[in-house]
Amino acid sequence: MSNTPDLGPVPQRISVEAEQVRRLVAEQFPRWAGLPVQPVADGGWDNWTFHLGAEMLARLPSAPEYALAVDKEHRWLPLLAPRLPLPVPVPLAKGQPGACYPYSWSVYPWLAGEPASADRIADPVRFAVDLAGFLRALRSIDPADGPRPGKHNWFRGGTLRAYDGEVQNALAKLDGYIDADLAREIWRSALDARWDGVESWFHGDVAAGNLLLSDGQLAAVIDFGTCGTGDPACDLAIAWTLLTAEGRQAFRGRLSAGKAEWARGRGWALWKTLATCACTLGDDAGNAISARRVLGEIFSEYATGRRAAVQPATG
């Protein structure tokens, strides 16, 4: 039997309306019953997110698989937050099913800031170093009894082989549109890069939308739904999806990421990017353009490293 985790079927998401949230809040947290409820623009995929007044948000999982993270967040975020150098969301209250909504849900404080993007970051190298410093602090926290890879975080912190089927399907669809041979080489190098087995905490979804800026600088890190303990290489994917080439090197240096960990991080970036490219093939919308740009970054960085590795010594 294979030890590779089974991702299972695609989660079947449900929709949540603002009126449901108003009823849930009124029934379970009457002290907040008079606060206005409004959907958050671009509020995420795993959860439906609503403004609850001006200073809080309600976060409701969109499928049973995503609801697995609720108890984890309520247990661990209050313990992690004081040990981290930037604000992270700490739950204020946990709601129960009701108002025709079937899962546990959460109320959080609203953390101010705007989602990171290349044009909003004031100093790309400083941003990269600050982010690496945050991840170093997270990794330094004792992982004992922490949540191991599982369905609650889609096996982040575990083997990339869990995603091999998705990668192969994407490559088959993209063959003739991208350099599929190079992509297969990069993916194979990631699968072959061994982890030393030393567990640490990781965020699990270090993406632009989960990194908040204030005056162009990193100000907060949100959405710990896929956090856990295990191999932290999944947190390196941001090096290709958002950072500049110079920032990428500063990020790697601050984290002291060796060759094998860097290869696995590149693999996490490649998996998500290939999946997005395959889903948006023939599309010229923003997600499609961004995914093609990221794929070019992955190819270019890998090819540069490969050339450097075979350069003859001089002197």
Image: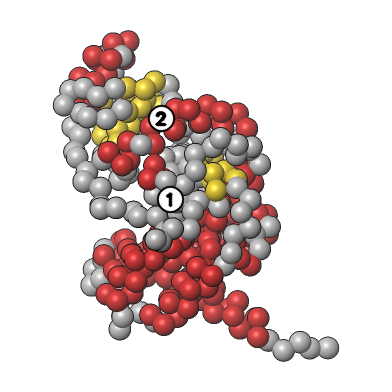
* In the displayed structure image, the side of residue 263 where residue 226 appears, left or right: left
Crowding near the residue tagged with mark 2, few <14, some 14–19, many ≥20 C-alpha atoms within 10 Å: some
* Mark 1 or mark 2, earlier in chain: 2
Query: Residue 98 location in percent, x, y?
Result: 21, 22
Q: Is residue 51 visible?
A: no
* In the displayed structure image, the side of residue 192 where residue 29 appears, left or right: left
**Quadrant of the snapshot with the N terminus:** bottom left
Q: Which residue is mark 1?
A: 155
**Quadrant of the snapshot with the C terminus:** bottom right
Q: Which residue is mark 2?
A: 71
Give amino acid for label 1: Phe
* In the displayed structure image, the side of residue 229 where residue 4 appears, left or right: left
Query: Residue 165 location in percent, x, y?
Result: 34, 66
Crowding near the residue tagged with mark 1, few <14, some 14–19, many ≥20 C-alpha atoms within 10 Å: many
Query: Residue 290 location in percent, x, y?
Result: 37, 64
From this viewpoint, which residue is outermost toward the front? Answer: 1
Q: Residue at x 61, y 54 (%)?
A: 197
